[in-house]
Amino acid sequence: MPLTDELRAQIKEMLVRRLRLKVDPAAIADDQPLFGDGLGLDSIDVLEVVAGLEKEFGAAIKTQEEGERILRSVNAIAAYLVEKGSPRKA
């Protein structure tokens, strides 16, 4: 799976939908931090994002260290999905 704008858009749509964010998915920058001063997600949101990645992309995050590396930005999530070859699920 190539690292494409389409993949990034799918990730942003999943984030907005699963977290019920009141933001246009296109307004989320690819390299914007997801936590803290970036998108403002918190530790409770992590669980929903991890569940969304598993359900919608077939990608499991098994450790906290993995999560900290992968859940930094849309770009980091997309790179992980490409690395794992995780397809978008219908």
Image (tube, rainbow, N blue to C red):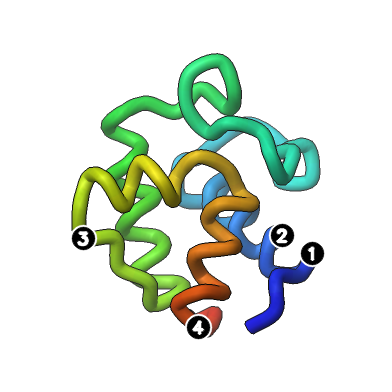
Q: Look at the numbered disc 1 and give the secondary structure of its residue.
A: helix
What distance separates the C-alpha of mark 3 from that of mark 4? 16 Å
Seen in the picture, residue 56 relative to 74 is either above or below; the reply is below
**Which kind of residue does numbered mark 1 sit on?**
Asp
Q: Is residue 42 left or right of residue 86?
A: left
Residue 9's disc is: 2
Residue 70: x and y in percent read 44, 51
Seen in the picture, residue 64 relative to 79 is either above or below; the reply is above
Q: Look at the numbered disc 2 and give the secondary structure of its residue.
A: helix
Residue lying at 58% horizontally and 31% vertically, measured from the top left: 33
What distance separates the C-alpha of mark 2 from that of mark 3? 24 Å
Nearer the observer, disc 4 or disc 1?
Answer: 4
Residue 85's disc is: 4
User: Which mark sits nearer the N-terminus, 2 or 3?
Assistant: 2
Residue lying at 76% horizontally and 70% vertically, measured from the top left: 4
Residue linked to disc 1:
5
What distance separates the C-alpha of mark 2 from that of mark 1? 6 Å
**Which kind of residue does numbered mark 3 sit on?**
Lys
Residue linked to disc 3:
62
Q: Determine the image quadrant of residue 62.
A: bottom left
Nearer the observer, disc 3 or disc 1?
Answer: 3
Q: Determine the image quadrant of residue 29.
A: top right
Residue lying at 44% horizontally and 45% vertically, measured from the top left: 71
Residue 22: x and y in percent read 62, 31
> Dot 1: within a 10 Å radius of its alpha carbon, few (fewer than 14), some, or many (20 or more) residues?
few
User: Which mark sits nearer the N-terminus, 4 or 1?
Assistant: 1
Residues 22 and 58: in front is 58
Q: Determine the image quadrant of residue 61.
A: bottom left
> Dot 3: within a 10 Å radius of its alpha carbon, few (fewer than 14), some, or many (20 or more) residues?
few
**Which kind of residue does numbered mark 4 sit on?**
Gly
User: Which mark sits nearer the N-terminus, 3 or 1?
Assistant: 1
